[in-house]
Image (spheres, rainbow, N blue to C red):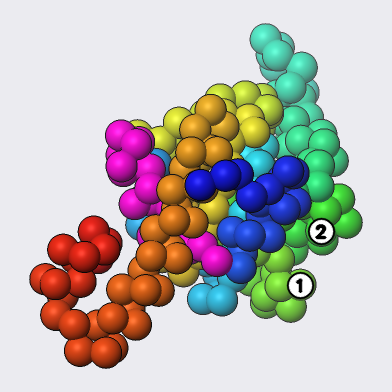
Amino acid sequence: MAVEWKSDEELFEIARRELFTAVVGDAMDKLGLVHQFLPPQVRPLEPSMRAIGRAMPLLGADCVETPPEVERNSKVLEQPFGLMLRALDDLKPNEIYFPAGGSPRYALWGELMATRAMKLGAAGAVMNGYSRDTPGILELKFPTFSWGPYAQDFAARAKVVDFRCPIEVESVRVDPGDIVFGDIDGVCVIPRASEEEVFTKALEKARGEKLVGKAIEGGMSATEAFRKFGIM
């Protein structure tokens, strides 16, 4: 099967039109990429939300506010959010804001951040933690994947210490530029080095599943359908 896209925009449009995370995950399993889904508690704030884009990972850390007279080893710790605002302003079109690190004691995303990300053409935000300002984000319809709503603020409890850096969420490694794909069934990360093969196989399977569905609707047994098509 020849590659059907020549740009990210074309690939992402095809994926939004024809693919879903389950079939992309199946394609990665076939290639031996078996640790690519984020934990199942990472969910869209609204069931219809879908997101696909390039990862812009950030690394955060818990941080207790200290008085100005206390000497710090890093100038980053003197800034209210660390490097968070710089990272947010550095988002590019079709990128996904992807923070990791720290503890799940506070929200990592909110309405004003979503507003800025939309202005920059970002594709969504994905986090292994909480988000807040839920009514505002839902009104913006900005694709946001998190553990759900929780109002406690990031500012007094953590800092972003680096961005556009590799991160790891449980067993899932996320490098800058990897493709992140999320829908109601979860969020998966497609390594840049494997993306062409993954999406080619995913499209083959998604289109094959439609044939299987029609065959089963026509009365074919599941056993016979799998024998004929090799898909289930």
Q: Nearer the viewer, residue 153 or 200?
A: 200
Asked if residue 28 shows in the view, the reply is yes
Residue 143 coordinates in the image, percent (x, y): 65, 64
Which of the image's four quarters has the C terminus?
bottom left
Q: Residue at x 40, y 36 (%)?
A: 172
Q: Residues within 10 Å of mark 1 (few under 14, many from 20)?
A: few
Task: Please determine whether, in this image, residue 156 is positioned above or below residue 186.
Answer: above
Magenta segment, prevailing SS (helix, strand or loop): helix
Q: Which residue is mark 1?
A: 140
Question: Outermost residue, bottom direction?
Answer: 218
Task: Please determine whether, in this image, residue 85 is positioned above or below residue 175.
Answer: below
Residue 145 coordinates in the image, percent (x, y): 55, 59
Q: Secondary structure at mark 1?
A: helix
Label 1–label 2 contact, CB within 8 A: yes
Mark sitting on residue 217 = none
Name the amino acid, label 2: Met
Name the amino acid, label 1: Leu
For marks 1 and 2 on the same chain, the one whose residue lies earlier in the sequence: 2
Q: Secondary structure at mark 2?
A: helix
Within the magenta stretch, is there residue 23?
Answer: yes
Q: Which residues are magenta?
A: 18-35
